[in-house]
Every structure is written in structure tokens, then in C-alpha cells.
Amino acid sequence: MNIDHLRYFLVLSQEMHYSRAAQRLNISQSGLSHAIVTLEKELGVSLFQKSGRGIALGRFGEALLPQAQQIVALADSCLRNFQMLKDGVGTIRLQTIPLLVIPTVTRLCRQFMGENPECDFTFSTGMSRQVCQALTEGKVDIGFCSKIYSDPQLEYAPILRRSMVAAVPLDHPLAQQSSVTLEDTLPYPHVTYSWLSGQRDPVEALFAPVRDRWRIAYEVEDANFILELVAQGFGISVLLDTPPVHRPDVKVLPLTQPVQMGDFYIVRRKPPHPLANVDRFFDFCVEQARHPAQDLPPVSLPAAPAE
């Protein structure tokens, strides 16, 4: 089926007049008539019928109209997308760990789109390992994670560093304090990250010297799940200080001794990327982390990871 013939059909269905439709399409009236006849022969039906001095859509024309609109719109979208790909712009497929969605990733994307209006994003979430695997498999273009995996195809850059805090139920004995030490938390059962999460590594490093006294009651991969268990009294947790931690049914306490930090990264397949906007967005995020805009709070950056 000829896409141009469908375009001609759509214009004629709007004008309901061959001369005006041909003028609008910048083709001859005979060329328009031939295209419509060809389309009708291909479909085996008449699309228009006479109506006074003009024409009107027939039964089969009315049936074709919404489908022709969809087909032409899809074809136009396809052409636009491939033109954007050829020009190095277009949609960036992004996957991030949930902890960075609010507000880090969303604000970076909004700011980048403000400076690059031709760019758009698709979004998905996953654990750090899933993010990096999706990158190596070519399923996404940019990732945000909390753990570096040894893969020669991938390039990481630090964008954020966060300290550890303790989260306890509101009626917990520790909730009366303004801060806690690691030693303060040891008498109580803990809810922590499973090994599926990249955030388990800094927590494990923190508790390594007292591992024999660290009472792990539950292990789950998602921070929101951890915090819900804490809020319901299943235990306390020591985890990275990110926005999801601060909720009204949990008391968050700074961990003063020892101080432990956790790092977050942006990751991509090593450049050059066929979509130039991917590399531009990567560089933009790294620059924003070092010199944030006024509406982004400054962050403490970890050292760049070793190659």
C-alpha cells in the first residue's frame, strides 16, 4: 500500500473537493484522481461517493479513515525518528536504580531537555547489576547505579556521594536520640539490602569490623521495602541518606561514628555512541555534578573510579 496514496486520501477526506485537495497537495488534479482510483482498486472498494456538487466519504472511506491516520502518523514518526538518529539526536533510553529517580535523575533530564529540546527520554528502573547488564546488551543508552562492575565496554563517572544514616521506627528507643553510632545499633535486629542491590557493599564495609554482632533479620533489595519494614517495627536499618529515606513514619538519625559514605555513578558504553546526545547527556551530568545549576544543590563527589 502506497503511503502517499493514503496521504492523498486523508487530504481529500478533509477538503471533499478534488481541485482544492490537489492544490493543497501541490499535485495535478488528474494525479490525485489516479492515486485515489489506484487505492480503491487495491482495496477493491469505493471510498468516496457523490454528494450534490461535491463528494463525501462512503461507508468504506469512513472505515479506512482512522486506520489511514494511524498508518500515516506512524510513518511520519518513523521518518522523524530516523532523521533524528542520523543527526545524532533523539530519544535516550535511560535506566536507573530507584533511589536516584527523585530528585537527581529527573532534574538532570529536565535540565538537559531544556537546553536540548529535540531530545527525549524513555525511563526504566532496575538494580545496579540489571542497569549495567542492560547497557552491555544494548537495551539502554545511559544508566545510573551505585556499584561498578568490571566490564571493558562500560565507562563510569561519579555523580553523587551520600553518607550513612540509621532509620528506626518512631517508637524505637533510639528515636529519642539526635544521632547514633554504629555501636548503638548493634543490640537491635537489622533490615538491610540483599546482595542483589549495589547498596549492600558500603553497608557491608561499614559492619565488617563488627560482623559477628550484626544481627540481620531481613534482607531485601529495595530501599522502600526496607523502610516499610522499619516503619512496621521489623527492625532498624543503616543505609544511605537519600530522599526516599525521609518519610513521616520513620526517624532518621545521622551516623556519627564511624562515618561511612556510598557513591553513585552514571554509566554508558564507551564512546563514541551512534546517538550523539547520549555522550552529550553523559558529559552534561558529570559537569552538573561538579558545578550544579542554581536549582540543584551542590554534592560531594567521590574520586573518579580507577580504570
Image (spheres, rainbow, N blue to C red):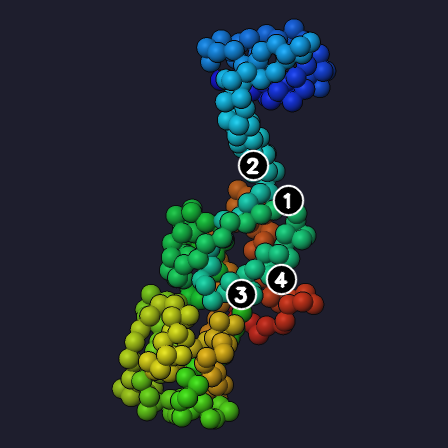
Eyeballing the image, is 200 above or below 167? above
Q: Which residue is mark 4?
A: 287
What distance separates the C-alpha of mark 2 from that of mark 3? Answer: 29 Å
**Number of the front mark, 4 or 1:** 1
What distance separates the C-alpha of mark 4 from that of mark 1? Answer: 20 Å
At label 4, the amino acid type is Glu
**Number of the front mark, 3 or 1:** 3
Mark 4 or mark 2, which has the lower sequence index? 2
Residue furthest toward the front? Answer: 52
Answer few, some or many: residues within 10 Å of disc 3's Cα (few below 14, many 20 plus, some between 14 and 19): few
Q: Which residue is mark 2?
A: 81
At label 2, the amino acid type is Asn
At label 3, the amino acid type is Ile
Residue 112 lies in what quarter of the image?
bottom right
Residue 227 percent location from the top left of the image: 41, 75
Eyeballing the image, is 283 above or below 66? below
Q: Mark on residue 118?
A: 1
**Number of the front mark, 4 or 3:** 3
Asked whether residue 235 appears in the rendered view, the answer is: yes
Answer few, some or many: residues within 10 Å of disc 4's Cα (few below 14, many 20 plus, some between 14 and 19): few
Q: Which residue is mark 3?
A: 102
